[in-house]
């Protein structure tokens, strides 16, 4: 039977203390042991089901991790305090001095800055490539390469990675393929397509209420345990751990992720088609005009659609700013970064979430100054929203 990530979440049933329908929250940073020997054994990693300290793991974090592993079809997962708190230890666990990474050039600005400006301090070098061109990816691999890094749907250009093709390259050269799936939860299941490690910023669609940060690394039990090792685990030692109260909240929100993703996709798909018909330069993986429409289609879990993210080019930064300010004033949504909220969010990526990328590189990768990235909300009547947006576009002279 075909893998369905939403069914995997639904099939998890937890009982709280006293028969609660939600698992009890472990409101403790440290844990007792009945004997000193069990404490010593736990620190050596020889006891299952014992907790030592909440930076390592907590029952609430483990419930959330188990759910995310089930959703991505991996054996294990480790949650973190933010998406960057998942990405940075993963890369540092896999790479050390002298190692090399091949990364997509269109990735979240924070990840880009980490690879471009921070990891060279540790003698880890990265080559950035157009991830949609497998020949370029292969040509960038050297004898020192350890990792292929990409986003399934990239931030902000919505380029789509051919995960099967990249997985074949990773296998051929004995590399780890890491896929950040933040933009396309449920729609794409990277591990099922051959990715070794799947990462999410839970701050976005998975939590869905823009009230908390979170991240997760999904992978093999061996890799997840290595991240948590008290001796040399990058997650354990760098300390970007999640708080149990937050883990419990995110787990509850995950239960409605399938409904939300369908509505985000439906609304974004409607608007993308309308905008394109108006003659506005629109990028959305669900449009036939998207260069990787067929690749997305070949990878997707169809019922969840092409996701809630789309971009338009307003022509200039001035027009983009005027449109965003007017849309906020008219209550279409918020002029804010981030994504996956129930209201629509919009930002000009070049001067916000991708501002870490130098202007000339932005130009080269096709990130224009007037590009507005939209995270389309759960609006009940998207035709009404469209009419409001169109009026705003007319008022600022985009139409
Ligand atoms: N990955 C992607 C694709 C993102 O868009 C972001 C944030 O915008 C991150 C990772 C980082 O996540 P966080 O902000 O939760 O650290």
Image: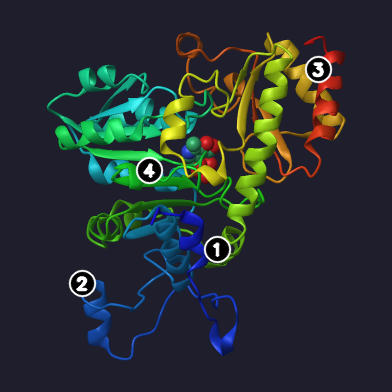
Q: Residue at x 81, y 25 (%)?
A: 389
- Residues under labels 2 and 1: Cα distance? 29 Å
30 or 263, which lies in front? 263
Q: Is residue 252 above or below residue 136?
A: below
First reached walking from the N terminus: tag 1 or tag 4? 4
Whether pointer 2 and pointer 4 mark residues with C-beta atoms closer than 8 Å, the reply is no
Q: Which quadrant would the C terminus be assigned to in this image?
A: top right
Residue 228, position as x, y percentages in the image: 30, 60
- Residues under labels 1 and 3: Cα distance? 38 Å
Find disc 3 in the rendering and name its residue.
393
Find disc 2 in the rendering and name its residue.
44
First reached walking from the N terminus: tag 2 or tag 4? 2
First reached walking from the N terminus: tag 2 or tag 1? 2
Q: Is residue 279 above or below residue 5?
A: above
Residue 172, position as x, y percentages in the image: 15, 33
Q: Residue at x 23, y 55 (%)?
A: 232
Q: In front of the other: label 2 or label 3? A: 3
First reached walking from the N terminus: tag 2 or tag 3? 2
Find disc 4 in the rendering and name its residue.
190
Q: In front of the other: label 2 or label 1? A: 1
- Residues under labels 4 and 3: Cα distance? 37 Å
Q: How many marks?
A: 4
First reached walking from the N terminus: tag 1 or tag 3? 1
Q: Is residue 308 left or right of residue 342?
A: left
Find disc 1 in the rendering and name its residue.
251
320 or 307, which lies in front? 307
What SS does tag 4 mark? helix
- Residues under labels 2 and 3: Cα distance? 62 Å
What SS does tag 3 mark? helix
Q: In front of the other: label 4 or label 3? A: 4
């Amino acid at each position: 039977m075909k893998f369905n990530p939403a069914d995997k979440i639904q099939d998890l049933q937890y009982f709280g203390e006293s028969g609660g329908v939600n698992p009890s929250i472990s409101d403790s940073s440290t844990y007792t042991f009945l004997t000193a020997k069990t404490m010593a054994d736990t620190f050596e990693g020889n006891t299952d089901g014992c907790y030592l300290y909440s930076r390592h793991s907590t029952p609430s974090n483990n419930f959330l991790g188990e759910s995310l592993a089930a959703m991505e079809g991996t054996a294990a997962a480790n949650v973190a305090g933010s998406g960057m708190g998942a990405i940075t230890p993963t890369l540092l666990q896999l790479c050390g001095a002298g190692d090399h990474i091949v990364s997509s050039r269109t990735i979240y600005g924070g990840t880009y800055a980490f690879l471009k400006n921070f990891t060279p301090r540790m003698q880890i070098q990265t080559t950035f490539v157009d991830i949609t061109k497998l020949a370029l990816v292969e040509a960038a691999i050297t004898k020192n390469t350890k990792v292929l890094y990409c986003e399934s749907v990239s931030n902000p250009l919505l380029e789509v990675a051919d995960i099967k093709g990249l997985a074949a390259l990773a296998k051929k050269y004995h590399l780890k393929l890491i896929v950040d799936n933040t933009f396309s939860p449920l729609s794409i299941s990277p591990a099922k397509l051959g990715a070794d490690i799947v990462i999410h910023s839970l701050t976005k669609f998975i939590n869905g209420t823009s009230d908390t940060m979170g991240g997760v690394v999904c992978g093999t039990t061996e890799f997840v345990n290595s991240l948590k090792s008290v001796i040399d685990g990058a997650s354990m030692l760098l300390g970007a751990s999640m708080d149990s109260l937050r883990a419990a909240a995110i787990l509850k929100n995950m239960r409605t992720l399938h409904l939300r993703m369908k509505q985000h996709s439906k609304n974004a798909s409607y608007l993308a088609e309308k905008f394109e018909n108006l003659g506005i330069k629109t990028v959305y993986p669900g449009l036939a005009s998207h260069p990787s429409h067929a690749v997305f289609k070949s990878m997707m879990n169809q019922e969840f659609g092409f996701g809630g993210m789309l971009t338009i080019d307003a022509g200039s930064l001035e027009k983009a700013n005027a449109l965003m300010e007017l849309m906020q004033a008219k209550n279409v949504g918020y002029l804010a970064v981030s994504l996956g909220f129930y209201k629509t969010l919009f930002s000009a990526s070049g001067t916000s979430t991708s501002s870490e990328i130098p202007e000339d590189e932005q130009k080269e990768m096709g990130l224009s100054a007037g590009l507005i990235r939209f995270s389309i909300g759960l609006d009940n009547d998207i035709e009404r929203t469209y009419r409001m947006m169109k009026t705003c576009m007319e008022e600022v002279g985009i139409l």
